[in-house]
Amino acid sequence: MFQDKQILIDIAKMKMPFGKYKGRYLIDLPEHYIVWYKNKGFPAGKIGKQLELVYELQLNGLEDIVREVKRRY
């Protein structure tokens, strides 16, 4: 359970390291941008896995969970 919590904390704290939205929190990236990555292919590594999770959260309307985590941590 702690690992799942840590994943959410990491996403809540992570900012986009490159591109048009560099410096913006991943959870606050526009949906169209995340969908573009979904169609293009997520980058390799940890950032790609985090963006893919953000996609799933946005797809299911759960991004407020991460925003609440961001407020707490």
Image (tube, helix red, strand yellow):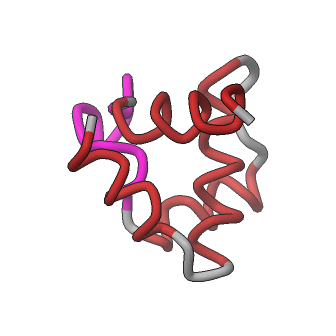
Q: 60 or 45, which lies in front?
A: 60
- In the rendered image, residue 25, in percent from the top left (x then y), is placed at 31, 43
- In the rendered image, residue 19, in percent from the top left (x then y), is placed at 37, 35
Q: 33 or 28, which lies in front?
A: 28
Left or right of 32? Residue 59 is right
Q: Which residue is found at the position 68% from the left and 50% from the top?
A: 53
Q: Quadrant of residue 21?
A: top left
Q: Against 1, is 62 above or below? A: below
Q: Which residue is found at the position 55% from the left and 73% from the top?
A: 62
Q: From this viewpoint, which residue is outermost toward the top?
A: 45
Question: Is residue 58 covered in magenta?
Answer: no
Q: Against 3, is 29 above or below? A: below
Question: Is residue 18 covered in magenta?
Answer: yes
Q: From this viewpoint, which residue is outermost toward the front?
A: 1
- In the rendered image, residue 28, in percent from the top left (x then y), is placed at 32, 58
Q: Which residue is found at the position 78% from the left and 45% from the top?
A: 41
Q: From this viewpoint, which residue is outermost toward the bottom?
A: 61
Q: Quadrant of the N terminus?
A: top right
Q: Main secondary structure of the magenta part?
A: loop
Q: Which residue is found at the position 50% from the left and 72% from the top?
A: 32
Query: Count of labels shown?
Result: 0
Q: Quadrant of residue 20?
A: top left
Where are the magenta residues, as a range? 15-29
Q: Against 66, is 12 above or below? A: above
Left or right of 40? Residue 25 is left
Q: Quadrant of the C terminus?
A: top left
- In the rendered image, residue 70, in percent from the top left (x then y), is placed at 29, 45
Left or right of 15? Residue 8 is right
